[in-house]
């Protein structure tokens, strides 16, 4: 069985500029991973332990 291929999202120019100017000493993949985790947590898709929320609670902000 093949492992899933990593996503390679295309960045808007503004996002790329923020990465270059504000996070120049961090790997872009690490910064984007942290941002997605923070967004998913804020949107209620992850619980406090970082697990994906399923069922009727998914997507609810707490």
Image: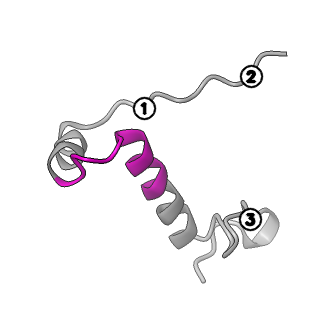
Q: Nearer the viewer, residue 32 or 39?
A: 32
Whichever of labels 1 and 2 marks the residue nearer the N terminus, that label is: 2
Q: State the residue position of label 3.
A: 53
Q: Main secondary structure of the magenta part?
A: helix
The residue sitting at 69% across, 72% down in the picture is: 47
For residue 40, above or below residue 24: below
The residue sitting at 32% across, 47% down in the picture is: 26
Q: Which residues are magenta?
A: 22-35
Q: Which element type, helix, strand or loop, lies under badge 2? A: loop
What is the C-alpha distance between the residues marked 3 and 2? 23 Å
What is the C-alpha distance between the residues marked 1 and 2? 18 Å
Q: Position of residue 45 (x, y in %)?
A: 64, 64
Q: Position of residue 50 (x, y in %)?
A: 67, 65
Left or right: where does residue 51 sit relative to residue 10? right
Give the label, 3 or 2, closer to the camera: 2
Which part of the image, by quadrant, shows the C terminus? Answer: bottom right
Q: State the residue position of label 1.
A: 9
Left or right: where does residue 55 sit relative to residue 22? right
Q: Nearer the viewer, residue 48 or 45?
A: 48
Q: Quadrant of residue 43?
A: bottom right
Residue furthest to the bottom: 62
Whichever of labels 1 and 3 marks the residue nearer the N terminus, that label is: 1
How is colour applied across the structure in the image?
A: one colour
């Amino acid at each position: 069985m093949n492992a899933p291929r990593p996503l390679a999202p295309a960045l808007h120019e503004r996002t790329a500029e923020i990465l270059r100017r504000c996070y120049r000493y961090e790997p872009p993949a690490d910064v984007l991973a942290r941002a997605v985790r923070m967004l998913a947590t804020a949107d209620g898709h992850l619980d406090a332990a970082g697990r994906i929320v399923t069922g009727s609670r998914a997507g609810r902000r707490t």
